[in-house]
Image (cartoon, coloured by chain):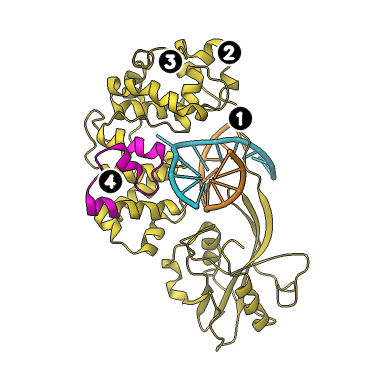
Chain colours: A yellow, B orange, C cyan
Amino acid sequence: MSWPSAPEFLAPLAPWFDRVRRELPWRAADLEAPHPDPYAVLVSELMLQQTQVATVIPFFTRWMERFPTPARLAAADEDAVHKAWEGLGYYRRARFLKAAAGTVADEGWPTDLQGLAALPGLGPYTAAAVGAIAFQWPTPALDGNAFRVLARLLELDGDPKTRAADLRTWVAPALAALGPSRLTQALMELGATVCTPQPACGRCPLADRCGARVAGRVAEIPPATRRAQVRSIELWLLAVEAEDRFLLHPPAVRGLLAGLWRWPTLEVTAGDAPGGPPPGLQGWPGWTQVYTHRREAVRPLHLQLEAGFQEASGLRWMPRTGLAALPMGKRDQRLRDLLRTPGEAPLEAPDPQALLSRLRADGAPSA
DNA sequence: GAATCGTGGAA
DNA sequence: TTTCCAAGATT
């Protein structure tokens, strides 16, 4: 590869970033010194995985108020941790962050990149980003933004992620020359605000030297990647009530919405047996719940059982007054909100015993 | 290496 | 309305 010298090639990024950079709650005022709170960097980087800056900001602010130090997070109740992450998605990040905070609280901060990468939830990008932004180590952190920017600058064909090793080697000297924290964030900020999938080359400080720009190939670099196919299912989402308590799945260890409390569901299939989704009963209007690789047609229903039913295995009866404190995904939050509708009345379950047995059978997460 | 894991904003 | 996809990591 006959790539230009990175420190000179990327030099205009530094003054550009100093001029246009956004003020973010986790961003230090002085980007040339080690960050005053490495924990804030760790929290922000975990939250920012596959999540846009604007979404993260309010979560980050509340999180730092509730769990201001690694020790406080490590000691926190897991439900409380998930509650603070509620609505942000990819919930295992919250568990990784709590575990990483425990290691830091016990052993102190790692002293090298390998140590950071050994923390749960920190992969190649996040470990290097924390190293550069929190500690000013010259560790090349390449996220999706950086890969797109570098692919265009160097006019790389194919998926730039396959050349991660070469690109990290190329960028590293520029980190040392221009400041690890400053250049790391500048590269990502350029990708997030200028060198976007539909780029605004007129505002780019590197437009004069961008290989793709000069060659007129900006639109085709990097090439589009195929996305995962989405499966569609239809399900009933059930608020089963008895004696002012509701039946809920406690948090699962793995799978969709692991770590969160979930309402029981019944998947609608062609051969529905008696006791399954009650065809004659109408609940609230349904909606479509979309996940990365799953699309649910959700039909919410509130059913009333007579008192005295035995515990359903794998499910727990939870008092109405405690529902608000349980961490739930958006789908289950929505039914919880519906239950507070004034005047809303539960429907009588046509065959409670058959219903409960179906709930046991469908108890697996994300069935 | 492919599949999995949430949600929301924007084109 | 669809489609894309965002400061990715894990299994």
Q: Nearer the viewer, mark 1 or mark 2?
A: 1
Q: Secondary structure at mark 3?
A: loop
Mark earlier in primary sequence (2, 4): 4
The residues colored magenta run A102-130
Label 1 to label 4: alpha-carbon separation: 35 Å
Label 3 to label 1: alpha-carbon separation: 23 Å
Percent position (x, y) of residue A207?
46, 14
Same chain check for tags 2 and 4: yes
Q: Nearer the viewer, mark 3 or mark 4?
A: 4
Q: Secondary structure at mark 4?
A: helix
Q: Secondary structure at mark 2?
A: loop
Amino acid tagged 4: Tyr
The quadrant in which the C terminus of chain A is found is: bottom right
Amino acid tagged 2: Gly
Q: Which mark is residue A60?
A: none
Label 2 to label 4: alpha-carbon separation: 43 Å
